[in-house]
Amino acid sequence: MPRPRPLANVQSSSSGNYSIYQSAGQLTPRTPHSRAGRAEEAYSEIELHGVEEDEEEDDPTGRHHQSVPLLRSSASDSFPATGYRGRGDDHDDENSKDSIGLNLRTIAARLPIAFGTMIAGLLLVLIVVSYQKPGTLEKYVGVSVPTPPASSKENSTLSVSNDTENINTTNSSPTTHHHHDALVISYGNYTKFPLLPTEYMSECEKIAGGFHHHGAYWEPHDGGVMDVVHADEGNEQSEICASTITYMLSGRVGLVADLALMAQAAALARERNRTFFVDDTYWNRGKWLDHFEDIRVTQPGPQPGCKAPPPEELVACPRVIHSGTAKYHFAHGFTEQYEDAYAHNLQRTKPIFDQAFESFKSTIRPSSQNTALIRGMREELGALLSPPNTNYISVHIRRGDSKPSSWNWKRLNISASPFFYVASDSPAALEQFDEEAGVTPTLSLNRSTAEGMKELASPDEYDQSDFNEIYTLEERVRQTRGVIVDLAVLSGLWSDEGEKIRPQAVICTIPSVICKLSAIGLGWEAAFGELEEMGFINKEHRRWVEIDEAGSIIPEWSRYMKPFKLKIVHCYPTEKVRALFKG
């Protein structure tokens, strides 16, 4: 029986007529690479159709159905050069050039980031080294860092253990050899001692103007303590105090500003176990003993009876402190050292507040003459008060060169029929207050009937810049006594034990230093009440009422840091005074 003829021109649903190649009963397998190096480069439908027609003409029987080998050698000329399997290792030459160019651009774009990261890492390493090993970087860059011998460190008692300083060096003889020349402070260019306050400021800038000290507050640098040479070096029988802090009354700020800074300096001397002195060489208000008791009696220090260092040995930093150099001693480091780091807001300042309170209680005490004046004013107040009420409201009005921090004001609700003690540097402000008070009883130095009390009142608004030129020394001393009396009666400072005549509250404005110290006179709990959980003032039970910022600054009270430098003369608005009497 004859074999049937193979089918031809079978239609495909997708491509039309295609021949089914058959040989020996087998269909030719189609693989993705039967015609090309990759599947996507195989014959298209049109190409297959053309091949089909050619094969039908050459081989109508369909026996020789495979006109193209299933697999070709890569060496064949007909092997497609475009297939990825047949390109070989050199097929990406052109693309490689583009890729290299792209990589170079990417590297160039990311190079600044890499460079910045390296610089940041280097700076971090330098910071860590400078903090952990002070002086190391200075040595590498060639900066001279003094390194005292062991004997110098032994002579210095300013250490972690006892916090005192005793540098046995001298400055009286140019032939005296110091342990290390780099530690010597030379005042050879000066002829008058102690130095002027401005000269001490300049010397402090020389010492503190270099690299910053990363050690603990008031601790010497690892390189040693810089000091002048001392006349009693090596003299174990010396009567000069071994370790001192001196507060200089420079005459450049008001009395109360000096007292506020002095209270901190006295507290620092107690904490650091140093002998405390007050220098009044350049004071423009007389002598310290004209107004206050002897500091050596009220705070004798660790060496009672020792003598003060010679004036030529008073070093700007850290032995001498005045209003101009206070920023080098009572700045951020002081706050970090003595604030309560675990408290919030106002509560953080309580340790500093307590130290200042102790300074005014035991160290800074009025002289016998001023104490008599304070007692006389309190007795006059007691005679005017209606028993059994022995309390009064204190109001301080500051004009002159003090700048208000805000013009905001809110009504103050006070109890009915209060009695006011008013302190001000301006006679005009006192008159204005009395007019607004009407029938409300008031008392001030100007209205006092006690003998000699009116003479202590300020004749005009206080301005530190022309205080020396306008008034004689006698007048300045008299006005200083008036400020002391006002401060005592206003705040309750220097009250005797069991004193019944005390301020019920103090109303003041924060730019005035008297306002800050009046809180200390009242005491912590009386001034601020029992603080809230987050350290805010108890508004209902406070007795220290600041009406300028009125709580917009947090904390509302802070220690006095430095004098105000702005000279702006302002008025005390009538509506503010009137607001005090509106219920």
Image: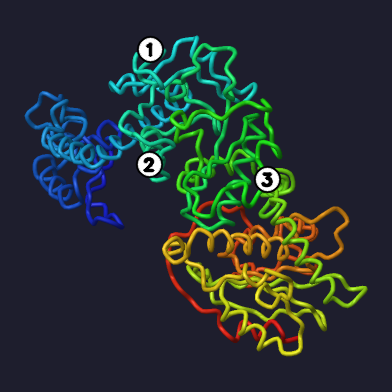
Identity, as a three-letter code, of the amino acid under mark 1: His
Which numbered dot is residue 61?
A: none
Identity, as a three-letter code, of the amino acid under mark 3: Glu
Q: Going 41% across and 63% down the picture, which residue do you hit?
A: 469
Left or right of residue 424, residue 62 in this image: left
Quarter of the C terminus within the rendering: bottom right
Left or right of residue 177, residue 32 in this image: left
Query: Mark 3, mark 1: which one is toward the viewer?
Result: 3
Q: Give how far apart the Cα atoms at labels 3 and 1 are.
A: 40 Å
Which numbered dot is residue 177?
A: 1
Tell me, yes or no, whether the two marked residues, 3 and 1, touch with CB atoms within 8 Å: no
Viewer-side residue, 17 vs 145: 145
Which numbered dot is residue 199?
A: 2
Residue 241 in the image: above or below residue 264: above
Q: Going 51% across and 15% down the picture, which residue do you hit?
A: 153
Q: Secondary structure at mark 2?
A: helix
Mark earlier in primary sequence (3, 1): 1
Tell me, yes or no, whether the two marked residues, 1 and 2, touch with CB atoms within 8 Å: no
Identity, as a three-letter code, of the amino acid under mark 2: Glu
Q: Secondary structure at mark 1?
A: loop
Which residue was labeled with disc 3?
Answer: 293
